[in-house]
Amino acid sequence: MENRDLQPALITLIRESRNWATVKRGLELFEHVKDMLRGHYHVDSGYFVFKKAVSLGEGERSFRVYSPWGDLHGTADELQQDVDRTFHLNANLADSASEQWLTRESVPGAVKAQWRDRGIQTGGSWIIKIGEVPAGMMVLYRRNLKTDDSLVMSLVVEQLSLVMELLRYRRAAEEASQRDPLTGIYNRRGATVRIRTLAELRSAAADNWIFAIFDVDHFKAINDQHGHPQGDRVLKEVAQVLSANLREGDICGRWGGDEFVIMLQCPKDLAPHIVSRLKDTVSCQVDKVSVSVGWAIWGQDGTTLKEIYRAADRRLYHDKVRNT
């Protein structure tokens, strides 16, 4: 690409990418990049591959595929399977990237036949990096033979990488701000956000959501008689027991002090039994500690967090009187 052609291409990139840093999610960013590539750089199709986390648990998929173009690749599952096979054979991400446009005549026979079937004349792939670490790939296709702007595509992926890094740091900071540093479970803010989100998504046909408050009995006496390190140990163990006995999708948070809240999905007639079982589990697993509990049924005892909390708090008060 000659300098006279490079300048307007760079101006377009700068203009179009100004708002990328305002996006909230990677998928939204990929949509923006796709619109720019298709609208200004004649990229007909493609997809993005990205590793959401640097370290992954056993069984988690390393790379996920995002295909905002939505054509030329068959189904999303077929594309994901193809990417899984490719990256399984090429553990080093850089081995799978061309970092430039390739013509159909220059690629291996199997790829050439696939491109011919899909009307692809040129294609290329560029590494997405978080810092210096490869974290994904931008794969692009064209139905024409334009191959002289590989440098521009490299600059596009560099800008994309910077915004993905910003999103990752922003997400980590947001997650940290919603975690209780002592127990590791959600703090009041984090629990509130998730409870309200669940309430908004709750379907009238679904099983009921149960909200419960757990309060450590005689917690002040534990601190006064045994010291705050012992009190901290109790809080951590109660949080561990409660969270360990919930299912994925349930919510457990430290509301403040020695008060914990949970929200879980179950039939409403089982609410007293499940809450009582959790109460007994804490008493059995945390040495010389008991808790009082109050619960409320979302949609029956209230339809807002404020109403539900008040209903659960009333039951908590009565339970605490019985435990005194």
Image (cartoon, helix red, strand yellow):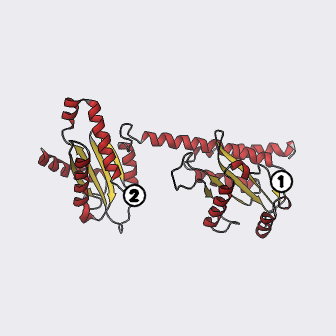
Q: Residue at the location (60% across, 54% down)?
A: 63
Nearer-N-terminus badge (2/1): 1
Q: Which amino acid, mark 1?
A: Thr
In the rendered structure, the answer to whether residue 289 lies left or right of residue 17 reads left
Q: Residue at the location (82% across, 44% down)?
A: 6
Residue 300 in percent (x, y) is at 26, 62
- Residue 67 in view, yes or no: no
Q: Nearer the viewer, mark 2 or mark 1?
A: 1
Considering only vertical position in the picture, is 169 above or below 304?
above
Considering only vertical position in the picture, is 111 above or below 281?
below
In the rendered structure, the answer to whether residue 260 lies left or right of residue 134 reads left
Q: Residue at the location (22% across, 55% down)?
A: 276
Q: How many marks?
A: 2
Which quadrant is the C terminus positioned in?
A: top left
Label 2 belongs to which residue?
A: 200
- Image quadrant of residue 233? top left
User: Distance between the Cα atoms at labels 2 and 1?
Assistant: 49 Å
Q: Secondary structure at mark 2?
A: helix
**Do the CB atoms of the residues marked 2 and 1 lie less than 8 Å apart?**
no
Residue 80 in percent (x, y) is at 62, 62
Residue nearest the observer in this picture, 179 or 283: 283
Residue nearest the observer in this picture, 173 or 285: 285
In the rendered structure, the answer to whether residue 242 lies left or right of residue 29 reads left
Q: Which amino acid, mark 2?
A: Glu
Label 1 belongs to which residue?
A: 147
Count neighbours of disc 1 (C-alpha within 10 A) and say few if under 14, some if 14 to 19, many if 20 or more. some
Residue 51 in percent (x, y) is at 60, 50
Q: Secondary structure at mark 1?
A: loop
Count neighbours of disc 2 (C-alpha within 10 A) and say few if under 14, some if 14 to 19, many if 20 or more. few
